[in-house]
Image (cartoon, grey):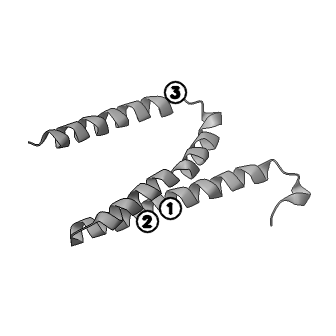
């Protein structure tokens, strides 16, 4: 087995474990603001997916790159929508969007 595959799997598993522990310890009152902010910051993921899409050389990687770009775009868009809805909650009723 290639050592880079093993290293990638190791980093992937560690990222899952660390992510779960970090999110599990966030109080429920802070969960939505934290997640909306991090979803909006995930534009970096979208840029990475676009870079991978440019390097795709066969149909399988084309499909995976397209899925990565679509999911990254949805994540960024969703983060902005949730953040906007949260900010609307803090405005007086007369200034809210209808």
Q: In percent of the image, x 28 and y 69: which residue is there?
A: 62
Location of residue 21 (image quadrant) = top left
Return the x and y of residue 92 as percentages of the image width and height.
Answer: 88, 52
- Image marks 2 and 1: residues in contact by CB distance under 8 Å: yes
What numbered label is drawn on residue 70?
A: 2
What numbered label is drawn on residue 37?
A: none
Of residues 98 and 81, the one drawn nearer to the viewer in this rendering:
81
Q: CA distance from mark 3 to mark 1?
A: 26 Å
Return the x and y of residue 50 as percentages of the image width and height.
Answer: 41, 63
- Image marks 2 and 3: residues in contact by CB distance under 8 Å: no
Q: In percent of the image, x 36 and y 65: which residue is there?
A: 67
Q: CA distance from mark 2 to mark 3?
A: 30 Å
**Which residue is tagged 1?**
74
Q: In percent of the image, x 60 and y 40: which residue is there?
A: 34
Question: Which of the image's four quarters has the C terminus?
Answer: bottom right
Name the side, left or right, on which 33 lies relative to 51. right
């Amino acid at each position: 087995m290639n050592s880079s595959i093993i290293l990638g799997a190791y980093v992937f598993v560690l990222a899952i474990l660390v992510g779960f522990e970090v999110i599990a310890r966030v109080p429920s009152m802070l969960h939505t603001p934290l997640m909306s902010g991090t979803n909006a910051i995930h534009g970096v993921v979208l840029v990475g997916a676009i870079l991978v899409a440019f390097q795709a050389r066969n149909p399988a990687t084309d499909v995976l790159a397209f899925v990565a770009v679509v999911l990254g775009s949805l994540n960024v868009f969703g983060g902005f929508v949730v953040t906007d809805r949260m900010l609307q909650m803090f405005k007086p009723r007369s200034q809210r969007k209808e």
